[in-house]
């Protein structure tokens, strides 16, 4: 290998614009449902309107005769599929929740499909349904996987404590709602299937479709050049993707299936609610003796899915003893799934408000309490961190925020009719990566092509991959063309779990290094090259030229132009593939990302309206690969944290089990008027133990801690502690 100094890559030249920005704002970027396909039919999913039971019969007579109808699929006539995972694709008549897909109408147009759907005569055998979390709390049980984690002797630690905090914190069901709804466009050609799918993982879609339709993986081609937001819900292969392919097969023509906004509430996952019982016991100096965190969430009857809210407590702070535990309450609702920082965002609400309450009981500054309990090693098994600088995050963010001017006593700061308060919390999220493959071509025209079977969900993957190739070749990243979102490209991982950048960048980087090696070997073997007979390992590239590294500094050393070398040798692109390797010592350390978020709120004294006037956050996320896309990810997470703190909640009807507010008018998310100053900085300390780019993923950490910091700031402003999200006016009024 050449040009890799001790596995540490030189900092990349950054693209100062989004690679895909122009394509998106001009409408040139095409999303799954927008591809022109001839003779396309439109599918509409019919949803169950009972919360539990069975579909007894579906009379499709009138619907079949309706204008434009090509096919109607029901549990009574749908083709039998292979393994499909935990999704409802008309393989049986069971109804697990209101909103579950129970039929699909395929027609010439979407209005005709919807019209025909209304003419289906559906009869059910209703069964008693479990609706309402509080009402069914007695059903709480350990989930199928994962149980109690314990360390030390909780009872003994508790007995020693000077101060004990014992509270319950609640977070509601939240629904992802990316701008682009889920969409699939499926076309069969014999036993070959092509789909455009809005997804966070083209390889997962490909595998699931191959298994469902019992065809070889090579017969399935998935494309997704752009995804209009994912946040976790597009990381799972849900019913509609398989139903679109099934409908295309039965109707004998391409089928487009786009979920309506209301269909995004239930059939494509949600963040389960949590009820978190937290007990913290500390010594007088603030040292945590015991952390106890039990989190109960709803789960569906389809599959146990756990919102792991208590998991971050196992590593966020050090404590003599610990006990964390998860339980589930099965309800007649759609499945839970990953939503941005699953576990960390909910868990950091509970734990970080509890820490604020503990600090007050100890009469200690909340930042100081966190510093005192900083875990120098991973408390779970004592491994060192690959890189951890959370204390610098507290200090830098506190400084930028002006924390020293805060009054510890609540309700002290009034500006006219506004009560002003300050609060903070720790942010954290895991750092993972997975093996990934990529292909890089050094082109005869001087440009470079990078292809990789991942996708960009709006986070900046295109941008940072252009940089990764450019970094390996020491060139301008604007001369790199990136292709993603196509399963014919080398296989790569999903866009999730904050793993993408750390996984895909090394793959493209390694492939570019391999292509550079081939280029060097070409020069060495070419009698017309100035480097004929040189050692290929001594050659390097910079800005389109090949040069001998030992003579780089000396004047008069002639470089050779890469385009001339390629032209002389047949004019073909120099191509190489690589698969990034995981570090061999990866089991000897823990990689984790950290941050500190400080918030200023103003609460109206009479209306109780809350303004998040200022959020200041500093993150320790390793190298920040691209300032624009990276800080945008982090501040986007903070915006979502504002939504989590103040707005978001899926309200479930207590009789019918359906989400009442399944639209954007009633399911509130932050708008511009809710978002004021956001100040994001990164320490930018590379983590080379984690990967050669020194960069950890950043897609999720931004949301963590924010809801707690806001709740803590509201308490500081008003003296009112609201432990149930979202913190709405009525709760503040009653507190
Ligand atoms: Mo994420 S919740 O890994 O898209």
Image (cartoon, grey):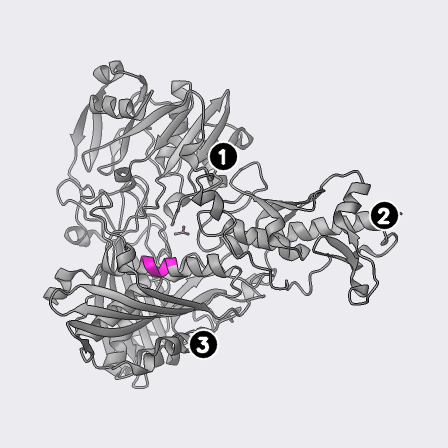
Q: Mark 1 points at which residue?
A: 222
Dot 1 alpha-carbon crowd within 10 angstroms: few under 14, some 14 to 19, many 20 or more: many
Res 581 visible: no
Q: Mark 2 points at which residue?
A: 525
Query: For the point 49% across and 61% down, which residue is it?
Result: 627
- How far across and how far down the image is residue 320, in percent? 37, 77
- How far across and how far down the image is residue 25, in percent? 43, 45
Q: State the extent of the magenta-drawn residues as a range.
A: 636-640
Q: What whole-number distance in Å separates the C-alpha atoms at marks 2 and 1?
A: 40 Å
Q: Is residue 639 above or below residue 41?
A: below
Dot 3 alpha-carbon crowd within 10 angstroms: few under 14, some 14 to 19, many 20 or more: some
Q: Nearer the viewer, mark 2 or mark 1?
A: 2
Quadrant of the rendered structure where residue 234 is?
Answer: top left
User: Relative to residue 387, is residue 535 drawn left or right?
Assistant: right
Q: What whole-number distance in Å separates the C-alpha atoms at marks 3 and 1?
A: 44 Å
Q: Which residue lies furthest to the bottom in this view?
A: 284
Quadrant of the rendered structure where residue 676 is?
Answer: bottom left
Residue situated in front as seen by the camera: 715 or 103: 715
Q: Is residue 213 above or below residue 24?
A: above
Query: For the point 86% across and 56% down, which residue is it?
Result: 534
Q: Quadrant of the C terminus?
A: bottom left
Query: For the point 34% across and 31% down, which residue is it?
Result: 89
Q: In which quarter of the image is the N terminus?
A: bottom right
Q: Mark 3 points at which residue?
A: 392
Asked whether the residues under the numbered discs 3 and 2 touch, taking CB atoms below 8 Å apart as contact, a structural biologist would say no
Res 162 visible: yes
Q: Judge whether residue 517 is colored magenta.
A: no
Q: Which residue lies furthest to the front in this view?
A: 26
Quadrant of the rendered structure where residue 46 is?
Answer: top left
Q: Label 3, secondary structure: give it.
A: helix
């Amino acid at each position: 290998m050449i040009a890799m100094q001790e596995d540490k890559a030189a900092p990349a030249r950054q693209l100062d614009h989004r690679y895909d920005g122009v394509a998106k704002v001009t409408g040139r970027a095409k999303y799954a449902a927008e591809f022109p396909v001839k003779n396309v039919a439109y599918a509409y999913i019919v949803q169950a309107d009972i919360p539990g039971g069975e579909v007894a019969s579906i009379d499709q007579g009138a619907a079949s005769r309706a204008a434009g109808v090509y096919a109607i699929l029901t549990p009574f006539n749908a083709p039998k599929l292979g393994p499909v995972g935990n999704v409802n694709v008309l393989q049986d008549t069971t109804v697990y929740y209101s909103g579950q897909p129970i039929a699909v109408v395929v027609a010439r147009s979407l209005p005709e499909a919807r019209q025909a759907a209304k003419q289906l005569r559906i009869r059910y055998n209703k069964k008693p349904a479990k609706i309402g979390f509080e009402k069914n709390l007695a059903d709480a049980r350990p989930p199928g996987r994962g149980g109690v984690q314990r360390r030390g002797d909780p009872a003994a630690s508790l007995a020693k404590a000077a101060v004990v905090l014992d509270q319950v914190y609640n977070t509601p069901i939240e629904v992802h709602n990316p701008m682009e709804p889920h969409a699939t466009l499926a076309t069969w050609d014999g036993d070959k299937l092509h789909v455009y799918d809005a997804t966070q993982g083209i390889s997962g879609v490909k595998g699931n479709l191959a298994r469902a339709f019992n065809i070889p993986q090579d017969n399935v081609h998935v494309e997704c050049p752009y995804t209009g937001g994912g946040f976790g819900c597009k990381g799972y292969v849900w019913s509609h993707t398989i139903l679109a392919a099934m409908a295309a097969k039965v109707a004998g023509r391409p089928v487009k299936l786009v979920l309506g906004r209301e269909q995004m509430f239930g059939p494509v996952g949600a963040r389960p609610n949590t009820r978190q019982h937290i007990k913290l016991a500390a010594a007088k100096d603030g040292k945590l003796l015991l952390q106890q965190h039990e989190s109960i969430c709803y789960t569906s009857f389809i599959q146990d899915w756990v919102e792991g809210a208590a998991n971050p407590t196992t590593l966020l702070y050090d404590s003599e003893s610990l006990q964390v535990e998860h339980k589930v309450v099965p309800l007649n609702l759609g499945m839970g799934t990953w939503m941005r920082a699953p576990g960390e965002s909910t868990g950091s609400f509970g734990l970080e408000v509890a820490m604020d309450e503990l600090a007050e009981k100890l009469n200690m500054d909340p930042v100081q309490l966190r510093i005192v309990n900083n875990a120098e090693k991973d408390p779970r098994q004592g491994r060192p961190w690959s890189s951890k600088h959370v204390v610098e995050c507290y200090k830098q963010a506190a400084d930028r925020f002006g924390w020293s001017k805060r009054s510890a006593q609540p309700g002290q700061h009034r500006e006219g009719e506004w009560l002003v308060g300050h609060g903070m919390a720790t942010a954290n999220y895991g750092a993972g990566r997975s093996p990934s493959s990529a292909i890089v071509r050094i082109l005869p025209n001087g440009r470079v092509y990078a292809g990789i079977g991942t996708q960009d969900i709006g986070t900046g993957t295109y941008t940072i991959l252009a940089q990764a190739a450019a970094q390996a070749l020491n060139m301008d990243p604007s001369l790199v063309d990136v292709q993603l979102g196509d399963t014919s490209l080398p296989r790569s991982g999903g866009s999730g779990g904050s793993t993408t950048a750390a996984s895909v960048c090394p793959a493209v980087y390694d492939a570019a290094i391999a292509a550079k090696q081939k280029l060097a070997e070409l020069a060495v073997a070419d009698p017309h090259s100035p480097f004929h007979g040189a050692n290929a390992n001594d050659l390097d590239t910079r800005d389109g030229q090949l040069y001998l590294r030992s003579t780089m500094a000396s004047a008069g050393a002639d470089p050779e132009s890469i385009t001339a070398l390629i032209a002389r040798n047949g004019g073909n692109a120099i191509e190489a593939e690589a698969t990034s390797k995981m570090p061999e010592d990866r089991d000897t350390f823990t990689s984790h990302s950290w941050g500190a978020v400080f918030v200023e709120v103003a609460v109206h004294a009479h209306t109780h309206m809350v303004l998040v006037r200022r959020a200041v956050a500093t993150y320790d996320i390793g190298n920040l690969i691209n300032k624009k896309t990276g800080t945008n990810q982090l501040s986007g997470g903070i915006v979502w944290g504002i939504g989590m703190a103040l707005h978001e909640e899926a309200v479930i009807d207590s009789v019918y089990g359906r989400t009442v507010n399944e639209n954007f008018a009633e399911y509130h998310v932050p708008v511009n008027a809710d978002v004021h100053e956001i100040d994001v900085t990164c320490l930018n300390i590379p983590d080379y133990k984690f990967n050669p780019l020194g960069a950890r993923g950043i897609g999720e950490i931004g949301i963590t801690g924010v809801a707690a910091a806001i709740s803590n700031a509201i308490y500081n402003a008003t003296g009112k502690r609201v432990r149930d999200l979202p913190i709405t006016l009525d709760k503040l009024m009653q507190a």
